[in-house]
Image: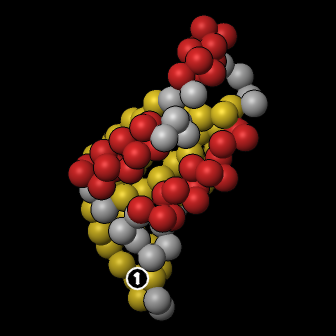
Amino acid sequence: MYSMVYITTSGGEESKKIARVLLEEKLVACANIISNMESIYWWEGKLEEDVESILLVKTRSELVDKVIDKVREIHSYQTPCALEIQIKKGSPDYLDWLDNSL
């Protein structure tokens, strides 16, 4: 089984930093960064607006807990968003590549 982890960050540089750590530790096979997402959310009882980046990482489902733990360890946010999205199907060649990269 495979998963993608959706992570929000303070910006592109933090996304790159987290992606590199996860890749170097072989916790993920691939990372994609989507810059300049506008976010509106509740924080400590107040409505906040911010510009963030999205970091999408692909891995085996068995590694998701380690991915989330590492993100919590190195992320700048007090309460980082790191959510698992399970991959039910995919290109067999891509999934083989993912396996071989971890």
Q: Residue at x 45, y 76 (%)?
A: 78
Locate the C terminus and report the quarter of the image it occupies.
top right
Q: Position of residue 24 (x, y in %)?
A: 42, 38
Locate the N terminus and report the quarter of the image it occupies.
top right
Q: Residue at x 40, y 71 (%)?
A: 77
Residue 37 appears in the figure: no
Q: Position of residue 60 (x, y in %)?
A: 66, 34
Corner quadrant of residue 39: bottom left
Q: Position of residue 10 (x, y in %)?
A: 31, 62
Q: Is residue 75 left or right of residue 13?
A: right
**Extreme residue in the top direction:** 93
Q: Secondary structure at mark 1?
A: strand
Q: Position of residue 75 (x, y in %)?
A: 41, 63
Q: Is residue 6 left or right of residue 91?
A: left
Corner quadrant of residue 69: bottom right
Corner quadrant of residue 89: top right
Could you say which is closer to the camera, residue 71 or residue 52? Answer: 71
Q: Is residue 52 left or right of residue 26?
A: left
Q: Residue at x 46, y 89 (%)?
A: 44
Kindly identify the amino acid type of the residue bearing the numbered disc 1. Answer: Leu
Question: Relative to 40, is 98 above or below?
Answer: above
Residue 99 appears in the figure: yes
Q: Residue at x 24, y 51 (%)?
A: 13
Could you say which is closer to the camera, residue 20 or residue 41? Answer: 20
How many numbered circles are shown?
A: 1
Q: Is residue 30 left or right of residue 17?
A: right
**Extreme residue in the front direction:** 25
Residue wearing tag 1: 47
Q: Residues within 10 Å of mark 1 (few under 14, many from 20)?
A: few
